[in-house]
Amino acid sequence: MSKTIYDVMILGAGASGMMCAAQLNEQSDLSVLVIEGNERAGKKLKISGGGKCNITNVNVTASNYMGDEQLIESVFAQFSKDDLLTWLANRGLKPVIRKEQYYFCPKSSDEIISILASASQKSHYHYNHTIKSLTKVNIDGKAYFSVTTSKGTHRAKKLVIATGAKSYASVGATDIGVTLAEQLDHSSKPFMPALAGLTLQPQAFWMKELSGISFPAEITVEGKVLSEDILLTHRGLSGPVVLSTSLYWSKGEVEINFLPYTSIKEVMHNNRKLLSTALSLPKRFTQALLEVLQIKDKPCASYKAEELNTLEKAFHHYKLSPAGTYGFAQAEVCKGGVKTDTINSWTLESNIVENLYFAGEVLDVTGELGGYNFQWAFSSAVVVANNMVQK
C-alpha cells in the first residue's frame, strides 16, 4: 500500500482523465495521481478518426446529445467548443475542418495526446493498473478514497471517475466506472452500443446485396432529423447518419429519405431519361429499390400518378425497422452510464458522496457522431478540475 495520500486521484487516462489532470496541473499545486489500465494514455484518442481524432464540431449544442439537457448546457457554458479550440491553439494545435463541420488534428492524433501529456506532466501516471475495488476509509478522523488495483492500494482526498464505457474493448475499455459508482450507492443505466451500424430484418436484406454503395441521406428517428452519408454494407447499414441514428434508436421504425435534397416528382416532370439515370443516386441502388417495389425502370415522364405516389413514398419516406446494432465491438461509444440525477449539474460532483466527481463517457451523456463525445470528455473534465481548484 502506498503511504502517499494524493490530493486528487483520477481513474482513467483517456481524453477526460488527461484533460482533468492537465487543468489541475496548470491551475494548482494539487498532487494528482492518474490510474490507467493500459500501458499508455490516450489509446482511444490515438485510433479515433482514422488516427487523426475528430476533436469537436463546428456546432455543439445540447441537442446533439442524449442526456440531461440542463446538465449538458451547464457544462458547455463553462467550457465551450471555442474555449477548447483556444486552449489547443495556445499550445500550438490548430485543428483543421473537414466537410465544413468536423475538427480534426492536422497530422495525427499524437498531436493532441502530446499536448495533454505535456500539460499534465506534473501528475503521477500509473499504467497497467487493473482497478479492483473502491472504498472510503477514515484516517485520523478524515475521509479518504481508497482504490485497490492489481498493483497495490492508493488513497486520495478527492476522486474523479473518468473510466469511459465498454465500447472499444480492444483498447481496454470496460464498465468498471459504473461498478465503482454503484459501490458508492450511485445508480446507472446499462451501457448499450451507440454510434454503431444497424442490422436489417429480412424484408430489407435487398440492401445488403449493394454493399459498398454510399450517398447522402436523411434519417428521422425519435423525432430527430439527421443528415449525412449512408453506407450499405454486407451486414446492414452504416455511415455517419446511421451511426448517429443508433444513438437515438432502441426499437421500432426509422424513416429514411434517400433523396433529401431533391424532389423526386420535380426530377421526373417532363423528363425522358430512365428513372435510374435521372436520379442523383447510384444506379444500382435505384434499380434494386424499383425491383423491390415491383415497378419497372422506364422514362420518368411515362409513370402514372399512382406509381409516382409509390415512388415518392419509397424514396422520401422509406420505413425501416432495424433488427439491432453491430454491437459493442463495432460501437464507437456507449449510451447509458452513471445516472446524472444524483450529480451536481454545475460541478459534476456527486450529491451523495462528497469529493467524488465524474467526467466523460462514464456519465449517462452521449453525443452524436462528429467530435461531440470528445468535446463532452474535455468540457466535463475542465468543469471538474475548475471546481476542485475553486473549492
Image: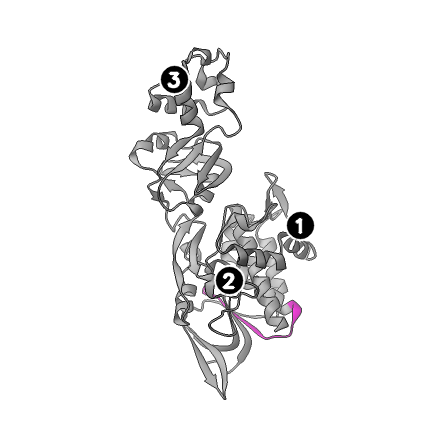
Residue 34, above or below 191? below
Q: Quadrant of residue 119?
A: bottom right
* Rendered view: 101 above or below 375: above
Identify the magenta region.
26-37
Graded by Cα atoms within 10 Å as few (under 14), some (14 to 19) or many (20 or more), the crowding at tag 2 reads few
Asked if marks 1 and 2 touch (Cβ < 8 Å), the reply is: no
Whether tag 1 and tag 3 are in contact, CB under 8 A, the answer is no
Tell us which disc is closer to us: 2 or 3. Answer: 3
Q: How many labels were placed on the picture?
A: 3
Residue where numbered disc 2 is placed: 40
In the image, residue 39 above or below residue 255: below
* Label 1 secondary element: loop
Which label number is shown at residue 94? Answer: 1
Q: Position of residue 53 (x, y in %)?
A: 55, 49
Residue at image location 61% in from the left, 54% down from the top: 111
Q: Earlier in the sequence, mark 2 or mark 3?
A: 2
Q: Which mark is drawn over residue 327?
A: none
> Callout 1: 10 Å neighbours few (<14), some, many (20+)?
some
> Is 36 in the magenta?
yes
Residue 243 at x, y percent in the picture? 45, 43
Query: Which SS class for mark 2?
Result: loop
* CA gap, disc 1 and disc 2: 24 Å
The disc labelled 1 sits on which kind of residue?
A: Lys
Q: Secondary structure at mark 3?
A: helix
Circle 3 residue: 306
Circle nearer the viewer, 1 or 2:
1
Amino acid type at circle 3 is Glu
In the orientation shown, which residue stands out farthest toward the right?
Answer: 90
